[in-house]
Amino acid sequence: MRIAIAQMATRAGDFEETARRMVDYSRRAADAGVELLVFPAAALCGVAPVQRADREGFLLDLMECLLTLVDELACPCLLPMLVDTDEAPLPEALLIDAGEIRPVRLTARMEAMAAHMGDGPVDQALPEVPFHGARLGVAFTYDDLDVYDDYDYDVDVIVFLSGYGFAVDDPSSALGTSLTEGRFPADAEATGAWIVGVGSLGCYDAQVFCGSSFVLAPWGELAAQAPSFEEDLLVCDIDPSAEGPLPDPVTPEVYDAPLMTWGALSTGLASLVEATGGSGACVAVTGTLASALLAVLAVDALGPTNVSAVIVAGDAGADASSLVRALRLGEKDVEVVDVGDADTAAARDLLEARLAALARRTGRVALGERDKTGRALEAGVARVSAARIEPFADVYRSDLIALVRTRNAISPVIPQGSLARYDVPELGSDVPDLASPEALIDFVDLVLSSYLEWELPVSDIVSERGHAEAVAAIVGRLRDLETARPPRPLAPIVSSRTLEEARSPLGLAWRDRPRDERERLGARLEELMGQGAQGEAGSDPGEAESDPARRHGEPGEGEIRDLMGYLRDFSLGGAFSAMGGSQQRGESGGRHDGEVPPASGLWNGPFSEN
């Protein structure tokens, strides 16, 4: 079977233009002899539902678009869409062939209900679609892939319609680019099926999708791969009866997380600037690492003719002046500000005021340099800010340092003096004794990512990383500053969980603390079970009749023991599990399910030392 992937960038809900381009792709695919053309998950409806008041109108226009596609598509197509239900948006895929539409997910569940499928719950029933001599499976999430792995589905090809935006903490979200570090080779081996990974492209609801679609053979060879951050029509022949090896396999890339993150930030920034209606961007370059990196990102994303800058006059702005010259910003696009004898905070406020004036005058969007570490731990003191977009708001400071090195390896535009100009979060006397400020930032960011993205309890973090007082101080400060933290900025989302998604209820007084093994839930349940067993062994058979609790239907010690056993099992592998339990496949925090937390060591992610 010849299959193709239309890796295309669209605007969610732009039905007329998207349908026109889909028809064009289908004609190109038909000319290439393609038997099934697959579109990305976000191409038609995006990744987020419309509000309730807009549902009816959105659905009516979507139906009209689908009717047009049924009439005009030139080859069989698999078209994903987002079904907006009362509970939660549900991804679906429509198989359009010879004028007929088949919703594959709904059909699978209806068939499972009719057949009383015994291998898994009905709500986990996934498609097994006979098509052109092969049996197709369709997965929308990592959990769906796990179901195909764990249950005996008779499929030759699994089409994975990824709805996950790129996340630094989830290598699999980069699809084909990260095959060497992602989950998909294991999925191919477990299912014995071809894996067709279909990546969306562009920025949808601030999530960035990198493309990089791929076709992976059951024995692990890469049959085809589309480029990252580019449109492409990827065509590949799939033989369900083949056992390998491929005659001409593609060599998988070595995953470069900083480079991929840079591409995601560039794509996200360009999309957000366009969405705001700006003609470009303007930045305040102060000579710090973050401001220098921000200026370089703006130029890479928008081009030097679409970027303006304000810099400090005199020796204080020497590195900033050097940077704007290296970036080839025009003289008319650089404004020099004399801050006189103002202290650091006042000088920064003056620059921000001039940045706001520059943005108004040029019609360009002002950018800010705050990162995820600073937003999490640094107090929101009164300050002037002109920023409409904060490109680094979802990027940890340690990752900014890695990004600077990666970008300077491409072309050394950032001055050496800026590389060491970054702040270290103040943790009081609880700062661990680490070798350097950078090592301390690495530790702080590891604690934050373990707590935020991976949702690990404080005790688990301490058991793996040590420094109990420092860990408690970091998490405590994160929670203490929630009410003082500025509102969610407009920013590309490049993690599986933002600070806003991890927010605790406002006013919550309780704070977690590190606990030793004797205080953990598993140990407490073991203790309660032991007490229940001792009590039951020493009880009188006639005691139940004389016990008022038993006579009034309250649970006895045996029932309590059963309940404790259930809770113990739940704690070892479920929501109450310690780090060992949470490393099981399919359990993770954040928006991306099915990945595993970072391993032991001082700093194991998001970026590798490669």
Image (cartoon, grey):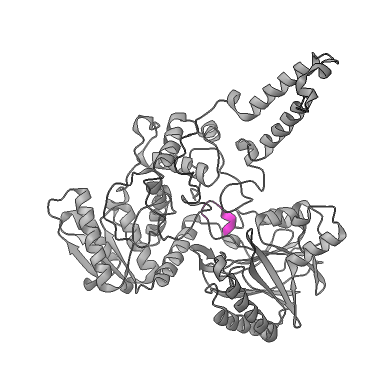
* Residue occupying image coordinates x 52% and y 51%: 497
* Residue occupying image coordinates x 62% and y 59%: 88
- Label count reads 0
> x, y percentage for residue 539?
80, 14
The magenta segment is 167-173
Q: Is residue 423 left or right of residue 134?
A: left
Q: Is residue 21 above or below residue 544?
A: below
> x, y percentage for residue 179?
61, 58
> x, y percentage for residue 606?
50, 49
Q: Is residue 514 left or right of residue 380?
A: right
Q: Is residue 306 above or below residue 496?
A: below
Q: Quadrant of residue 234?
A: bottom right
| 340 magenta-colored | no
Q: Is residue 37 above or below residue 480?
A: below
Farthest left residue? 340
* Residue occupying image coordinates x 66% and y 35%: 571
Q: Quadrant of residue 476?
A: top left
Seen from the viewer's position, the closer of residues 412 and 335 is 335
> Which image quarter is the N terminus in?
bottom right
> x, y percentage for residue 555?
76, 27
Residue 253 visible at all? no
